[in-house]
Image (cartoon, grey):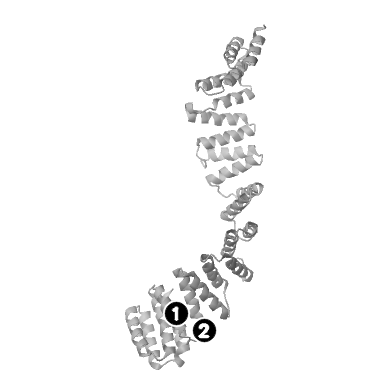
Amino acid sequence: MNKSIVTLLLAASLYAAAPTMSMKTYETITKVQEMMEAQRYTEAAKMLDEHLVKSEKLPFDQAYMYNIYGYLYIAQGSYSKALVVFEKALALQMLDEAMTQNLLYNLAQLYLQEGDYARAIARFERWMEHAKVVSPEQRMLYVSALVQSKAFEKALGVVKQVIAQSPKPVALHYQTRFYLEYELGRLNDAIKTLHGMIELFEPNKTYYAQLAGLYAMQERYSEVLGVMELMRAQKMEFSEAETLQYARLLLSQDQPYRASKVLDEALRTQKLPRSTEHLKLTAEAFLSAREYLSAIAYYEELAALEGEKGEHYGVIANLYARKHQYDKVVQTVDKALKQGRAGKGDLLMLQGFAYFELNETLKAKAVFDEAKKDPKHAKAASQWIEFLTGS
């Protein structure tokens, strides 16, 4: 607690209490206050201790001195000791209503700071019973104690009251409400709160991300996509995970072209590393969008990256065939065959057809002769050979 605030509280209390305490106590407390202002805490504590013994039969004086002792401990950062003497002052039941209320509120704050949430709640509630005015900020301190005690239902009720009574919207109040609704499993209420936060406050990426997360929990993926579209419209920067989520959502909603463009841009601008996972996803997105040349470029990068471990040349060969680039089909099948991957018969049939389209009949026949060894393609390869030889 700020030392200047401690001094002001002491001065106000001293002025109010002076007429009802002994002159000796008044003089002692005046000297103690001067010592505290000069940060002579050890001397102040010694003087209070001596006078507490002498004033044993003066309960009001003792209550007031315990109260002063509490501020002395606060000034030194000894909050647990302050709690002890403040409770002694309260237990004597000699202080007037104003001082008692001030004491209760100090106790509530100290218990909250020390992590004794049950006692903090008890003191807050007793203080609020008689408080003439409870500000939204003070109620939120009470809420924080309730939250720490897992009393979410009660905390939510107080937060709603704070929101209703506040002269203008405060982000912290709404954030706390959202948190409590989420913890209580009221996802629809939490979604409504987030929508309200988005409308009331400056654009905040966290709100959008939380909203998207809640929709995802409910498997409302079209809404998740809608939220991410709003984020992009407001030029909010996507993380790597968010970029991938956005692209996959577009794919799931049958928008492969847009997904491919998002991934392509992220790779080009280095917002996504050019890993095999990301390259493959982008290639597949372009393939689904029937952007075959772009898909080929990514599959070729994948093939080069994976070397002999890869199996993308077969896909590339088929894509070249779709673009009628038969010379590249032949070359790519050769690369695929060198890898010794499964599906050799399929590749040979494709290469034989490519040679045919290139008017290289002898090479086509030789390839179909090899393909005929695969039982799966024996009949089709034989038919091609008969066609090519005219027999």
Which residue is label 2 attached to?
A: 98
Q: Of 384 and 294, which appears nearest the observer? A: 384
Residue 183 image position (x, y, % from top left)? 57, 59
The disc at residue 87 is 1
Determine whether 208 is above or below 264 in the image.
below
Residue 19 image position (x, y, % from top left)? 46, 93
Which sits earlier in the primary sequence, circle 2 or circle 1?
Answer: 1
The disc at residue 226 is none
Q: With 58 as the anchor, is 124 left or right in this view? A: right
Near mark 2 (Cα within 10 A), the count class, few <14, some 14-19 or many ≥20, is few
Residue at 59% x, 58% y is: 182
Q: Of 269 and 66, which appears nearest the observer? A: 66
User: Can you say which quadrant of the picture contains the C terminus?
Assistant: top right
The residue mark sitting in front, 2 or 1, is: 1
Near mark 1 (Cα within 10 A), the count class, few <14, some 14-19 or many ≥20, is some
Determine whether 229 is above or below 301 in the image.
below
Q: With 117 as the anchor, is 23 left or right in this view? A: left
Q: Residue furthest top?
A: 391
Residue at 52% x, 84% y is: 98
Residue at 60% x, 58% y is: 185
Q: With 299 as the anchor, is 36 left or right in this view? A: left
State how far apart marks 2 and 1 are (Cα): 16 Å
Q: Name which residue type carries label 2.
A: Ala
Q: Are marks 2 and 1 in contact (CB under 8 Å)?
A: no
Residue 93 image position (x, y, % from top left)? 48, 86
